[in-house]
Image (cartoon, helix red, strand yellow):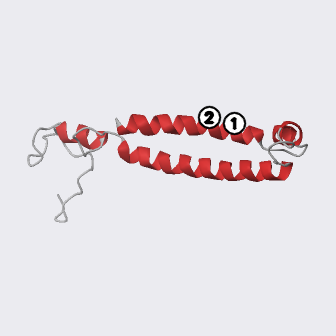
Amino acid sequence: MLYTIILTVILIICVLLTIVILLQPGQGGGIGGGIAGGALSGGAGLGARRTADLLSKSTTVLGTALLVLCVLANFAIYRGGSSNSAVQQSGATEQPVDGDLNNPSQTPSAVPELPDSSGN
């Protein structure tokens, strides 16, 4: 339940972060400069400089929130009752091929035997 809520907030932040980044002025002024220069500068008192500061700060805040929520989402994931990894779980159920490790197999060794020092 908590993971679903965190994931929803992460998706909202991603959309907002995309919009804020696209509004930031580039080398030619960008969309943010057009909004601040024409529509909002008369009544709201926002200039191009204040809009850039606001967009820069909101990018920092949204980026930090995204990073923190991604780390929190990792801890909020429901892992079931098992604390072992999938590799540990599969290894615990497998039995050895020979059945018993104390009794060596009857197949001959691949290493050749050395002759005795007595001359045989």
Which residue does the image show at 21% across and 40% down from the upper left?
81
Residue farthest to the bottom?
117
Q: Which mark is residue 80?
A: none
Q: Quadrant of residue 74?
A: top left
Which residue does the image show at 8% across and 46% down from the upper left?
103
Residue 57 x %, y %: 68, 53
Task: Pick whichever, 120 or 58, lies toward us.
Answer: 58
Taking 47 as reference, is 89 left or right? left
Taking 45 as reference, is 70 left or right? left
Disc 1, SS: helix
Q: Quadrant of residue 25?
A: top right
Taking 17 as reference, is 81 left or right? left
Q: Quadrant of the N terminus?
A: top left
Taking 7 as reference, is 78 left or right? left
Residue 7 x %, y %: 46, 36
Residue 116 drawn above or below residue 3: below
Residue placed under numbered mark 1 in the picture: 19
Crowd tier of the residue under label 1, counting other residues whose Cα lies within 10 Å: few below 14, some 14–19, many 20 or above: few
Which residue does the image show at 57% across and 39% down from the upper left?
13
Whole-angstrom CA distance, mark 1 to mark 2, is: 6 Å
Crowd tier of the residue under label 2, counting other residues whose Cα lies within 10 Å: few below 14, some 14–19, many 20 or above: few
Residue 89 x %, y %: 24, 40
Q: As shown in the figure, which amino acid type bears the numbered disc 1?
A: Ile
Task: Pick whichever, 38 or 118, lies toward us.
Answer: 38
Residue 58 x %, y %: 66, 49
**Numbered disc total:** 2
Q: As shown in the figure, which amino acid type bears the numbered disc 2?
A: Val
Task: Pick whichever, 19 or 38, lies toward us.
Answer: 38
Q: Are marks 1 and 2 in contact (CB under 8 Å)?
A: yes
Residue placed under numbered mark 2 in the picture: 15
